């Protein structure tokens, strides 16, 4: 591959909704001379879903667990660590943004399905311009038709009226690399078919969701969700490879 000294080639292994790899992967080029500063944004809500899929639809129930900033802090810390290792010359800026407003725009009519709403693009371009940032690394939650649960959360599948049944923790998220004009130049997704089963007895998980809102259970479930989120974040960065002067490095 012929690569100029001023070009950063991002080899993107795009993952489909079903976790398969598109073939062949297409290289997407960014002019490295224009990349001096980057920022990491989280569009993943801090309130994670705790959901039960019961014997019938009448037994389905959902509540939320507030992780109190741990999701955002984990996303920022993992992303910054990976970016510093791959491109230490980049300046990583901490910028202010209204996450809830941007999530609402992302999930609003015409925006949620493909992350292609012009209004959101303009918001991201404005963030780049006002903060002097060349590239944004945006982590957002996803929802799949085939795989239950959106974003970060815990899902209980049960066929009884008393047992929590098969309980898993998931992290359905995607990483979008966004240029200074608000254009998405690269996407990497975590594997949606790879939730991790939890030991309900050891964690103290009960059938009734209200019984799982005790501080001790919330603490244990929060730790499990952060562990799964960290795994997914590293998987997504593993799917992005930067090449410069013939040397390729995982972000």
Image (cartoon, helix red, strand yellow):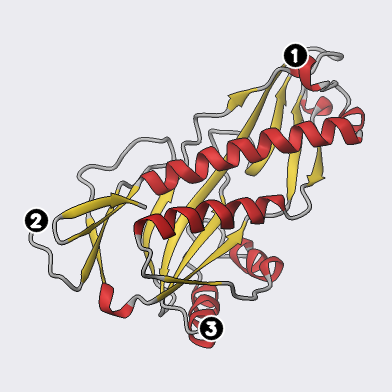
Q: Where residue 182 appears, x then y in whole percent? A: 44, 75
Circle nearer the viewer, 2 or 1: 2
Q: Where residue 100 appears, x then y in whole percent? A: 71, 66
Q: Using the image, tell me which numbered label, if any, was put on residue 145.
A: none
Circle nearer the viewer, 3 or 1: 3
- 56 and 175: which is toward the camera: 175
- Say if 205 sits above or below 138 in the image: above
Could you tell whether 14 is left or right of 127 in the image?
left
**Disc 2 vs disc 1: Cβ atoms closer than 8 Å?**
no
| Cα–Cα gap, marks 2 and 1 | 54 Å
Earlier along the polypeptide chain: callout 2 or callout 1? 2
Circle 2 crowding by C-alpha within 10 Å: few under 14, some 14–19, many from 20 = few
Could you tell whether 13 is left or right of 4 in the image?
right
Q: Would you name the residue on which mark 1 appears?
A: 159
| Cα–Cα gap, marks 3 and 1 | 52 Å
Q: Where residue 163 appears, x then y in whole percent? A: 82, 13
SS for dot 2: loop
- 236 and 26: which is toward the camera: 236
SS for dot 1: loop
Earlier along the polypeptide chain: callout 3 or callout 2? 2
| Cα–Cα gap, marks 3 and 2 | 34 Å
Q: Would you name the residue on which mark 2 appears?
A: 1
Q: Using the image, tell me which numbered label, if any, was put on residue 131.
A: 3
Q: Where residue 142 appears, x then y in whole percent? A: 56, 48
Q: In this view of the protein, can residue 156 be seen by the observer?
A: yes
């Amino acid at each position: 591959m012929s690569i100029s000294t001023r070009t950063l080639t991002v080899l993107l292994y795009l993952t489909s909704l079903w976790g398969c790899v598109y073939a062949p992967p297409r290289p997407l080029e960014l002019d490295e001379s224009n990349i001096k500063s980057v920022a990491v944004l989280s569009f993943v809500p801090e309130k994670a879903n705790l959901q039960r899929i019961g014997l019938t639809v009448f037994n389905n129930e959902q509540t939320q667990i507030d992780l109190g900033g741990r999701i955002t802090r984990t996303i920022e810390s993992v992303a910054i660590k990976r970016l510093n290792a791959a491109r230490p010359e980049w300046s990583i800026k901490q910028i202010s943004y209204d996450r809830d407003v941007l999530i609402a725009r992302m999930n609003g009519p015409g925006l949620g399905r493909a992350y292609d709403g012009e209004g959101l693009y303009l918001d991201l371009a404005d963030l780049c311009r006002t903060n002097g940032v060349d590239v944004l690394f945006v982590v957002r939650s996803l929802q799949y038709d085939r795989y239950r649960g959106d974003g970060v959360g815990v899902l209980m599948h049960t066929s009884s009226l008393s047992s929590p049944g098969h309980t898993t923790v998931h992290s359905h998220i995607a990483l979008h690399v966004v240029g200074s004009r608000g254009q998405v130049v690269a996407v990497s997704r975590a594997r949606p078919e790879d939730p991790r089963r939890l030991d309900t007895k050891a964690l103290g998980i009960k059938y009734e969701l209200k019984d799982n809102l005790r501080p001790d259970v919330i603490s244990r479930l929060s730790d499990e969700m952060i562990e799964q989120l960290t795994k997914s974040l590293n998987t997504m960065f593993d799917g992005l490879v930067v090449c410069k002067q013939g040397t390729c490095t995982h972000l």
